Structure formats: C-alpha cells, structure tokens
Amino acid sequence: MSAAAPGNFEPKKPVQLALPKDDPITQDYLVKCDGTNGGYPTCVAIKGTVFDVTNNAAYAVGGQYHVFAGKDASRALATSSLKPEDVKPEYSDLGDKEKGVLDDWFTFFSKRYNIVGQVTGSAANL
C-alpha cells in the first residue's frame, strides 16, 4: 500500500484556515501529537512545518494515514510510502522527482490544515 501523490490541490469543500503559526514545537511534543494522547492535537510535520490534522479521521488511530501522526513524514510522503521505517524527516538524498512530490504534498496540506508551528532543531531539506 502506498500514499498516492495529490493530484488536485484544492479541497473538495472550502476550508477556513487560521493564519499560519511559527511556534516552536519540540520533537517530544510532536511525538505526543499522534492521536493517542488526550489533550493533544493530532499533527503531521512536512519539511519541519507542523500541520494540525486532528479533524481528519484518516490520521487517527486505526486510520490509513495514522503512521504519519506525531512525526515528520517528509521522506514517506516524497516516496509515496506508508511503511513506518520511511516516516522520517530526512529527504535531501532523494531525487528531484521525489522532492517535487514532497513539494506537492506540502501544498496539498497547506490548503487543508492549519500550520501550528515548526519543529525545533529541524532544517529544511535534511
């Protein structure tokens, strides 16, 4: 099973997004945002940017994309993988095609989910 690259970036239903935040989010906090800890949102990071995906059941426990919850899923998204071992932030060694897919996913998420912060200690293009 693989994560399909987004084809159309516009949401099917209009989404009202808050202004993006650049709050620092630690790895320890992000890990708690995996949908299993009450009181924490469910989040997915892409290229160090953290998106709140709480309202999408696909990222909840048992959902098809739960593997991404509480993590920076850059590499997995770039390679269209749902394998847990691919869910990591490093992607600089990937080819231009995969980096383009990752950019598409970033655009897809940015049109659907609120940006709640940036992972501390992360650098773009790890």
Image (spheres, rainbow, N blue to C red):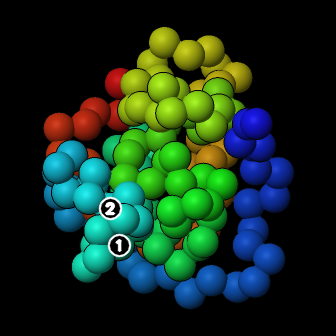
What is the secondary structure assignment of the residue under circle 1? loop
Whether residue 107 can be seen here: no
Decide: few, some or many residues near mark 1? Use Cα within 10 Å; few <14, some 14-19, many ≥20: many
Query: Residue at horizontal 35%, vertical 24%?
Result: 126
Quadrant including the N terminus: top right
What is the secondary structure assignment of the residue under circle 2? loop
**Residue 21 image offset from top left, x and y in percent:** 30, 69
Q: Is residue 67 above or below residue 121?
A: below
Q: Which residue is mark 2?
A: 33
Please, which residue is most extreme toward the front here?
62
Decide: few, some or many residues near mark 2? Use Cα within 10 Å; few <14, some 14-19, many ≥20: many
Front one among 1 and 6: 1
**Residue 20 image offset from top left, x and y in percent:** 37, 70
| Dot 2 amino acid type | Cys
- Residue 6 vs residue 92: left or right? right
| Dot 1 amino acid type | Pro
**Residue 68 image offset from top left, x and y in percent:** 49, 48
Query: Residue at horizontal 61%, vertical 61%?
Result: 63
- Residue 43 vs residue 93: left or right? left
Q: Is residue 20 above or below residue 87?
A: below
Tag 2 near tag 1, CB within 8 Å: yes
Q: Which residue is mark 1?
A: 41
Query: Residue at horizontal 28%, vertical 51%?
Result: 31
Label 2 or label 1, whichever comes before in sequence order: 2
Label annotation for residue 65: none
